[in-house]
C-alpha cells in the first residue's frame, strides 16, 4: 500500500469515528406542544367560556378513596390583555369570582382572593410562573413531595417528569409549593404553561400517640 493510500485510509477512518460521535450526541427532539382542546382553559390564549373540571378526592394516605368524589369547575368568565377573570363553582356551593393579572409570563392573584379559592388557598405567593424553567426535581413518598430529602415548601419552580395519581399519569409537570407557615399542611400546584393539572394538600393529625395523614386532591378531569 502506498503512502498516499495509507493516508487516505487513516483520514477516512477518523472521519467515520467523528461522524459517529456527532450523531450520538445529537439531542432528541422535544415533543411538540399537545393539541389543545379549545374548550379547556389556556392561560396563553384565554377565551371566555373555557373551563376545566376538577375531580375532588379525599382519603387517608395509603388508603383507597372511600368518600364520594365531587367536581369543581374553573371557568374563564372575562378576559382581556391585562387580566383573566375566573369563576370557581360546584354543586350546592356558592360561586367565587376572582381575577388574575397577566404580566408577561406570570399570572398574579392577590392574597385576599387566593385565600378564598379552593384551588389556590394555600399558595403563599402572588405569582404563578408559567414559563419558568424548573430548578429542582422532586421525589414522592407517603403523600408528600421532597427535594433532596427535605419537604418541598420553597418559593421556586420544581418538576415531576412523571407522576401517577388516581390511576392517571402526567408528564413534565411544573410544581410549586410555597406554603405559608401559618397553615399546618403540605400543598402543591401542578401545572404547565397552559393550565392547572392538580391542586394537592396533605395534613397530619395525631390521636392516642398515632399520626394519620390525610390528602385532598383536585385533579383535572380527562
Image (cartoon, grey):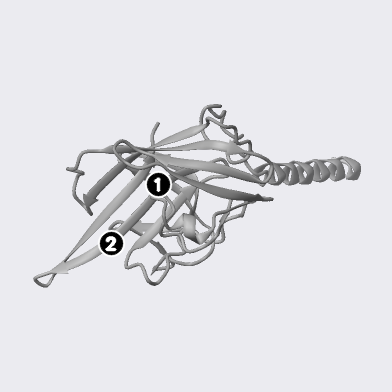
Q: Quadrant of the N terminus?
A: top right
Q: Position of residue 51 (x, y in %)?
A: 48, 33
101 versus 135 height, above or below: above
Check disc 2 and report its element: helix, strand or loop.
Answer: strand
Residue holding disc 2: 203
111 vs 150, nearest the viewer: 111
Q: Is residue 99 left or right of residue 150?
A: right
Q: Residue at x 18, y 49 (%)?
A: 63
Q: Residue at x 59, y 32 (%)?
A: 47
Q: Residue at x 51, y 31 (%)?
A: 40
Q: Position of residue 161 (x, y in %)?
A: 48, 48
Q: Alpha-carbon neighbours of circle 1 within 10 Å: few (<14), some, or many (≥20)?
A: some
114 vs 59, nearest the viewer: 114
97 versus 187 height, above or below: above
Among the two numbered marks 2 and 1 on one chain, the one whose residue lies closer to the N terminus: 1
Check disc 1 and report its element: helix, strand or loop.
Answer: strand
Q: Residue furthest front?
A: 94
99 vs 25, nearest the viewer: 99
Q: Alpha-carbon neighbours of circle 2 within 10 Å: few (<14), some, or many (≥20)?
A: some
Q: Residue furthest right?
A: 4
Residue holding disc 1: 163
Q: Position of residue 35 (x, y in %)?
A: 57, 28
Task: Please identify, in this view, whether the residue under mark 2 or under mark 1 is nearer the observer.
Answer: 2
Q: Residue at x 43, y 58 (%)?
A: 115
> How far, Cα to Cα, is label 2 from label 1?
20 Å
Amino acid at each position: 500500500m502506498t503512502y498516499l493510500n495509507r493516508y487516505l485510509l487513516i483520514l477516512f477512518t477518523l472521519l467515520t469515528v467523528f461522524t459517529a460521535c456527532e450523531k450520538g450526541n445529537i439531542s432528541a427532539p422535544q415533543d411538540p406542544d399537545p393539541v389543545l382542546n379549545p374548550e379547556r382553559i389556556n392561560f396563553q390564549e384565554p377565551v371566555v367560556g373555557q373551563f376545566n373540571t376538577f375531580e375532588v378526592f379525599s382519603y387517608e394516605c395509603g388508603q383507597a378513596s372511600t368518600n364520594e368524589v365531587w367536581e369543581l369547575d374553573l371557568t374563564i368568565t372575562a378576559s382581556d390583555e391585562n387580566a383573566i377573570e375566573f369563576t370557581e363553582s360546584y354543586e350546592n356551593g356558592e360561586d367565587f369570582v376572582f381575577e388574575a393579572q397577566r404580566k408577561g409570563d406570570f399570572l398574579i392573584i392577590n392574597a385576599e382572593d387566593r385565600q378564598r379559592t379552593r384551588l389556590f388557598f394555600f399558595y403563599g405567593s402572588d405569582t404563578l410562573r408559567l414559563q419558568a424553567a424548573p430548578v429542582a426535581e422532586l421525589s414522592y413518598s407517603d403523600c408528600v413531595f421532597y427535594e433532596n430529602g427535605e419537604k418541598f415548601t420553597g418559593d421556586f419552580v420544581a418538576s415531576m417528569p412523571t407522576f401517577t395519581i388516581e390511576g392517571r399519569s402526567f408528564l413534565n409537570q411544573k410544581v410549586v409549593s410555597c406554603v405559608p407557615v401559618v397553615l399546618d399542611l403540605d400543598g402543591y400546584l401542578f401545572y404547565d404553561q397552559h393550565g392547572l393539572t392538580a391542586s394537592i394538600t396533605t395534613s397530619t393529625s395525631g390521636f392516642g400517640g398515632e399520626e394519620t395523614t390525610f390528602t385532598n386532591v383536585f385533579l383535572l378531569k380527562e
